[in-house]
Image (spheres, helix red, strand yellow):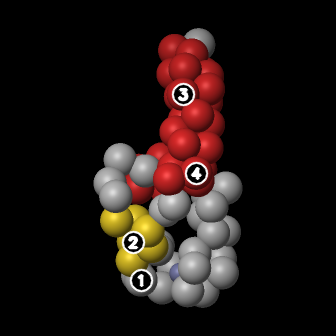
């Protein structure tokens, strides 16, 4: 999970997922804007791709 560049708190999965659709991610703890590097964006979108179907399946059953 990514962490905030300002307050160093780790973001939970839902926070990251909600914010990963935007370039500018606002920290849920200190409200500062964070800019993800291309590498961490790639990593977090990969995680979303893997985990999103699991969440959907978990909601169905
Ligand atoms: Zn923060």
Q: Do the residues labelled 1 and 2 touch (CB within 8 Å)?
A: yes
Q: In this view, does 26 lie above or below 43?
A: below
Which element is circle 4 on? helix
The alpha-carbon separation of the residues under discs 2 and 4 comes to 18 Å
Q: Please identify the quarter of the rendering in which residue 32 is found.
A: bottom left
Which element is circle 2 on? strand
- Write down the residue under mark 3: 49
The quadrant of the image that shows the C terminus is top right
Q: Earlier in the sequence, mark 4 or mark 1?
A: 1
The alpha-carbon separation of the residues under discs 4 and 3 comes to 15 Å
The disc label shown at residue 39, or none: 4
Residue in the image at 43% along x and 50% along y? 20
- Write down the residue under mark 2: 26
Q: Earlier in the sequence, mark 2 or mark 3?
A: 2
Q: Is residue 56 above or below residue 1?
A: above
Q: From the viewer's perspective, is the residue at label 4 or at label 1 nearer?
A: 4
Residue 20 makes an appearance in the image = yes
In the displayed structure image, the side of residue 18 where residue 6 appears, left or right: right
Residue 22, given in percent of the width and then of the height, sits at 32, 54
Q: From the viewer's perspective, is the residue at label 4 or at label 3 nearer?
A: 4
Question: Crowding near pointer 1: few (<14 within 10 Å), some, many (20+)?
Answer: some
The alpha-carbon separation of the residues under discs 3 and 1 comes to 26 Å
Q: Earlier in the sequence, mark 4 or mark 3?
A: 4
The disc label shown at residue 32, or none: 1
Residue 12, given in percent of the width and then of the height, sits at 61, 58
Residue 35, given in percent of the width and then of the height, sits at 44, 68
Q: In this view, does 60 lie above or below 33?
A: above
Question: Crowding near pointer 2: few (<14 within 10 Å), some, many (20+)?
Answer: some
Q: Which of marks 3 and 1 is nearer the N terminus?
A: 1
Q: Earlier in the sequence, mark 2 or mark 4?
A: 2
Which element is circle 3 on? helix
């Amino acid at each position: 999970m990514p962490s905030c560049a300002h307050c160093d708190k780790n973001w939970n999965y839902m926070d990251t997922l909600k914010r990963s659709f935007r370039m500018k991610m606002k920290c849920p703890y200190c409200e500062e804007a964070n800019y993800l590097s291309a590498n961490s964006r790639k990593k977090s979108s990969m995680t979303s791709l893997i985990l999103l179907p699991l969440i959907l399946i978990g909601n169905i059953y």
